Image (tube, rainbow, N blue to C red):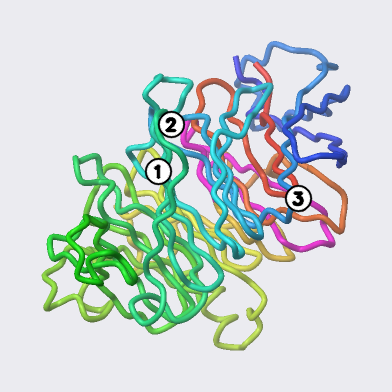
């Protein structure tokens, strides 16, 4: 029974230091202060007081961690990718431990990560396969691969004139569950462009400096081709859904979200107006942008794991939920406030899809994540304090492992993994 999911849970989480770049487990006795709102009285809550030892799994990366992404494929559950100032590490995690199984040296700050649907974990098979895409601060993209029988490999593409011309804010594989779901990658940037990358193009374009470009017959991987879709404002996030291989959810930084059919005929794909199926708006964010008061706020949007009709996002101090079955002129179905200082990440829980989390990058709050329940959207969220100020959560994600939902958060030079309740 998962009683704590429907309760007000307050954790006293303390920051811990490490002397070397290794994974470790920090344990401390906690008192879970639980208050059951009247709304939840119908639940059969079978506990009195919980005084237990809760384990936080912590990994010291060695540099500031800017991006963290959990793998959500069935056989990749438990894999976590973290992006720092110079490298990407892949962690194999359990509820009580984690270890580095791949380390890719990129040489610049990582700004976004996305897992390939073909990734599998050593926890599920001896023939495991790691594949993900990273974006760097110098605006190149990196296809990172490693298998049980091969070493780390880095394939660079999208740099120079062929890719984005400003910071890449988010990337996502194009979704669906077909045999080619790992072939297409979407990226969005401050340059107001959504690029759809074909990683295995039929037209072979040699990589710069490859043997073929010198006239040699030695085989080389062709450079991916990109299909651009232009938008009117800088783009903050992009995500896909496993139920569709043709639609992408794109959010700009001014309060608009777009469900884009990226497989529209190429001649019609020149702009967002020709490829957008649905446009959604967050009225408060639009008003703030028009008044010029949202310059420091970021935007983050995502699809609910069990339904492509439910979309959530955070804009400034507001979060909003949309039901595509009830468009209501593109306005939110539900909305509320999570952090008055402004939220920076919105994530759905893949295993218990009624839950979503929001973090803030305001150092005045410390490192805090609020977890909301859509069933009780107007009640206070469960607040998880991970570290004191001036530390803050740069990024976080829910893991897809079974059982109690777990969160992995990037705080300073550490990633912290913890459960959001008890059985």
Asked if 75 appears above or below 410 in the picture, the reply is: above
Which segment did they paint magenta?
347-375
Q: Residue at x 37, y 53 (%)?
A: 323
Q: Secondary structure at mark 3?
A: loop
Q: Which residue is mark 1?
A: 131
Q: Is residue 325 magenta?
A: no
Query: If you read the primary sequence from the N terminus, does the residue marked by circle 2 or circle 1 appear first?
Result: 2
Q: Which residue is mark 2?
A: 76
Residue in front for this viewpoint, 251 or 256 = 251
Q: Is residue 154 left or right of residue 205?
A: right
Q: How many marks?
A: 3
Q: Position of residue 226 (x, y in %)?
A: 27, 70
Residue in front for this viewpoint, 29 or 374 = 29
Of all residues, the one furthest to the bottom in this rendering is: 291
Task: Indicate which disc residue 311 carries.
Answer: none
Q: Residue at x 51, y 38 (%)?
A: 349
Q: Position of residue 135 (x, y in %)?
A: 49, 62
Q: Which residue is mark 3?
A: 413
Query: If you read the primary sequence from the N terminus, does the residue marked by circle 3 or circle 1 appear first?
Result: 1
Query: How crowded is the residue under tag 3: few (<14 C-alpha within 10 Å), some, or many (20+)?
Result: many
Q: Position of residue 316 (x, y in %)?
A: 63, 68
Q: Is residue 353 magenta?
A: yes
């Amino acid at each position: 029974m998962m009683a704590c999911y429907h309760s007000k849970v307050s954790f006293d989480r303390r920051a811990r230091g490490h002397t070397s770049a290794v994974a470790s487990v920090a344990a401390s006795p906690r008192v879970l202060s639980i208050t059951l709102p009247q709304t939840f009285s119908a639940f059969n809550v079978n506990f009195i007081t919980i005084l237990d030892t809760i384990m936080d799994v912590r990994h010291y990366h060695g540099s500031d961690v800017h991006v963290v992404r959990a793998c959500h494929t069935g056989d990749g559950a438990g894999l976590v990718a973290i992006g720092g100032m110079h490298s990407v590490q892949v962690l194999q995690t359990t509820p009580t431990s984690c270890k580095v199984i791949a380390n890719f040296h990129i040489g610049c700050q990582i700004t976004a990560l996305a897992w390939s649907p073909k990734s599998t974990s050593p926890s599920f098979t001896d023939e495991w396969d790691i594949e993900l895409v990273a974006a760097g601060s110098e605006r190149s993209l990196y296809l990172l691969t490693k298998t049980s029988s091969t070493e780390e490999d880095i394939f660079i593409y999208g740099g120079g004139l062929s890719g984005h011309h400003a910071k890449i804010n988010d990337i996502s594989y194009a979704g669906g569950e077909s045999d080619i779901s790992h072939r297409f990658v979407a990226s969005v940037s401050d340059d107001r462009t959504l690029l759809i990358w074909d990683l295995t193009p039929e037209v072979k374009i040699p990589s710069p400096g490859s043997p073929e470009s010198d006239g040699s017959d030695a085989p080389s991987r062709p450079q991916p081709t990109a299909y651009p879709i232009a938008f009117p404002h800088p783009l903050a996030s992009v995500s896909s859904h496993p139920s569709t291989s043709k639609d992408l959810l794109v959010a700009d930084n001014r309060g608009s979200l777009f469900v884009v059919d990226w497989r529209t005929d190429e001649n019609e794909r020149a702009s967002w107006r020709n490829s957008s199926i649905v446009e959604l708006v967050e009225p408060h964010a639009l008003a703030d942008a028009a008044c010029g008061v949202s310059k420091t706020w970021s935007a983050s949007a995502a699809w609910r794991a069990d339904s492509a009709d439910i979309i959530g996002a955070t804009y400034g101090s507001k979060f909003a939920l949309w039901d595509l079955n009830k468009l209501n002129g593109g306005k939110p179905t539900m909305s509320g406030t999570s952090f008055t200082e402004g939220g920076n990440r919105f994530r759905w829980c893949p295993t218990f899809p009624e839950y979503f989390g929001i973090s803030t990058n305001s150092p005045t709050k410390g490192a805090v994540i609020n977890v909301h329940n859509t069933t009780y959207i107007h009640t206070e969220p469960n607040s998880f304090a991970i570290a004191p100020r001036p530390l803050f959560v740069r990024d976080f994600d829910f893991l897809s492992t079974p059982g109690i939902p777990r969160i992995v958060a990037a705080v300073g030079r550490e990633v912290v993994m913890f459960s959001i309740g008890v059985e």
